[in-house]
Amino acid sequence: MAKIFLHTSGCSFNHADSETITGILLRAHHQFVASEDEAELVILNSCTVKSNPEQRLHATMRRLSRERKKFIVAGCVPQADSANKLFSHVPVLGVNALDKVDELVNLTLAESEQAFNKELFLSSTQQDMLRFPSSRLHPFREIIPLNAGCLSSCSYCKTKDARGDLFSYDPRLIRNRFRQAINDGAKEIWLTSQDTGAYGLDRETNIARLLSLLLEKEGSFRVRLGMTNPTYVHRFQDELIKIFSHPSLFKFLHIPVQSGSNSVLRRMKRGYRVEQFVNIVKAFRKADPLITIATDIICGFPGETEKDFDETLKLIDKLEIPVVNISKFYLRPGTQAEHFEQHNSILIKKRSTALAALHKKIALRSQQPWKQWQGSVLVCEKGKNNTLIARNDWYKQIILQEGILGTFQEVKVKTVYPFDLRTF
């Protein structure tokens, strides 16, 4: 038995992987501790989406080496970049080998040369991770991965190198995990993957049918559907809109457009046009005008002209998207975009700042109808300054001064801010 500290960076899928790592190691009687200082071994579950988290990972690796602290690097970075010299004599655990984490922990602690066996611990063979034990890290929130990989080939994406092509998990295993989580007291279920909209397309099913299967379960809970790209939604749009009316499903659609310019989307190899994104948003809003739409934008993609960027601003403004996750373009080694002519960082920052300013105005404007709203919310997590964070059925973030985590309660909104509503 070893004392282990686990650090996770990146998306909700990475956090789901960490819960699998935790479940496997707890079953093997290892102990998790709250700090590196207490640990005999540190596991770094890494993210490769942007360069900044990867640079922080490299800095942490150097520091732990200086401190002579044993560590394992897990996740997308070593899986996507296994030839990197930084991993030449470091124990690494790929995203497809989580079931081997106990073996790797024991080899690392024993300082065995087998701990550096990349062929064993960086498998390229995908497997259904729902077959392995998992330990929920949030008391009332279950994260359920639906599929690994995707069907896209975006020219800027490094995650594809780590997660590979689409591999949808068995719907029966997903349903079992879903029902078990609710029976165990989970009140919020996050369904996650690189692209939930691609789920099942390798199994002759789709995400709408999976949701229908899951929501047969009765109980007092809410489900959040993770990011779904516009590429495939049109195939089952009517089914998906219908299931979104279910009372247990958050009325929240995260659908990343990335750019308002079709020429940029072509260079990104996103596989859809702006008009398709617009039609999807309008169709969901027609069914429920209050639905919360979230999107992602990359500012400063190689070749993005002022006209291209202006089209992005106009798109966000015209559709009044209330939630926009803004990213500055980061060149990722080994991607097609690495070979495109790059913008300088000053221009990229200027564009991201302009979009952020517009987003804040739209966000505040979109919050106004919610002033004086009253209804039921799910109290999800602790906030700052002794507050609590809750979500209503449209996934609006509502700040409370009192409440009980993991319960539903009635509230009334008194003040509105660009990115949250408050009861005080």
Image: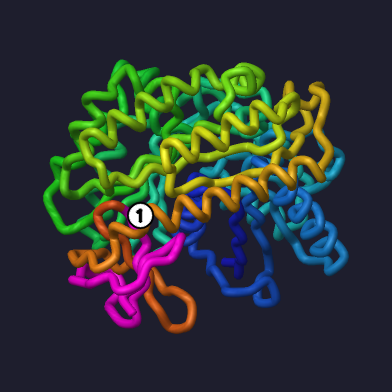
* Percent position of residue 5, x then y: 61, 66
Residue under the image location 29 percent in, 65 percent down: 371
Q: Quadrant of residue 204?
A: top left
Q: Is residue 422 rendered magenta in the image?
A: yes
Q: Is residue 140 above or below residue 292?
A: below
Which sits in the foreground, 308 or 256?
308
Residue under the image location 32 percent in, 17 percent down: 235
Q: Is residue 368 rendered magenta in the image?
A: no
Q: Is residue 220 left or right of residue 184?
A: left
Q: How many marks?
A: 1
Which sits in the foreground, 367 or 264?
367
Looking at the figure, which quarter contains the C terminus? Answer: bottom left
| Range of magenta residues | 395-424
* Percent position of residue 122, x then y: 66, 35
Give the structural element (helix, strand or loop) at label 1.
Answer: strand
Looking at the figure, which quarter contains the N terminus? Answer: bottom right
Which sits in the foreground, 111 or 131?
131
Q: Is residue 284 above or below residue 17?
A: above
